[in-house]
Image (spheres, grey):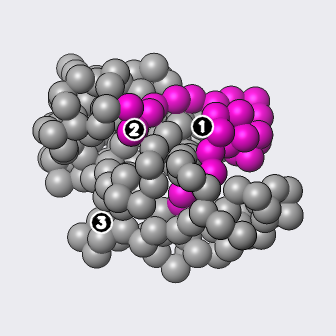
């Protein structure tokens, strides 16, 4: 078995909103794969703070803020090396196959993540072992960072700049009025 000539990783999540921890995982994926496709999936267990289209825009702007060398053009990040999409009403693996992903990227923050990811890894491997799942542990300063924490703190008017990029903090401020 050999590495695919060109690799494309799918990094899927709710990204509601994208956090500095997500950006850490995206950075690790960008260093590892030829193309990274960040996709917003619908999680029926969570109510979204931002609509999918708004979240896609926040992802693009956060990436451009975090990596000014991303060429600053939101629709052509890293000269096409980073894509932003959405999937709904299909499995993660079906979406991965549909976009031509060679790998699925998942992030780990804490021990409780491992149990869920271990189960997902096993199921995904049974359904389609041709698309390996790769796990990255986020940097220590982001182990406690989550979208839920950002939403909760922002709702109370707390500073969330340490959790999210300035464009996301501004979007929260607009919502508060």
Q: Quadrant of the N terminus?
A: bottom right
State left or right for residue 97 relative to residue 165.
right
Q: Which mark is residue 41?
A: 1
Residue 132 visible (yes or no): yes
Q: Which residue is mark 2?
A: 82
Q: Earlier in the sequence, mark 3 or mark 1?
A: 1
The segment highlighted magenta reads 80-106
Q: Is residue 113 above or below residue 31?
A: below
| Residue sitting at x 44%, y 33% | 83
Determine whether, in the image, residue 133 is placed left or right of residue 136.
right
The reply to whether callout 3 and callout 1 are in contact (CB within 8 Å) is no
- Residue 117 in the image, given as x and y percentages of width and height: 63, 67
- In front of the other: label 2 or label 3? 2
**Secondary-structure class at tag 3:** helix
> Dot 1, crowdedness within 10 Å: few (<14), some or many (≥20)?
many
Q: Name the residue rendered at 28%, 53% in the picture.
A: 20
> In this figure, which residue is indicated by the disc labeled 3?
142
Separation of marks 3 and 1 at Cα, in angstroms: 22 Å
């Amino acid at each position: 078995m050999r590495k695919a000539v060109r690799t494309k990783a799918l990094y899927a999540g709710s990204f509601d909103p994208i956090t500095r921890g997500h950006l850490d995982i995206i950075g690790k994926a960008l260093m590892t794969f030829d193309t990274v496709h960040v996709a917003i999936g619908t999680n029926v267990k969570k109510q979204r703070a931002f609509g999918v289209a708004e979240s896609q825009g926040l992802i693009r702007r956060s990436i451009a803020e975090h990596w000014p060398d991303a060429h600053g053009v939101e629709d052509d990040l890293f000269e096409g090396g980073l894509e932003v999409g959405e999937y709904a009403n299909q499995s993660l693996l079906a979406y991965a196959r549909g976009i031509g992903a060679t790998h699925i990227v998942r992030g780990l923050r804490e021990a409780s993540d491992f149990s869920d990811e271990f189960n997902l890894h096993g199921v995904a491997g049974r359904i389609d072992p041709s698309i390996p799942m790769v796990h990255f542990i986020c940097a220590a300063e982001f182990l406690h960072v989550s979208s839920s924490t950002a939403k909760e703190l922002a709702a109370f008017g707390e500073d969330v700049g340490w959790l999210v990029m300035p464009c996301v903090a501004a979007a929260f401020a607009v919502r508060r009025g």
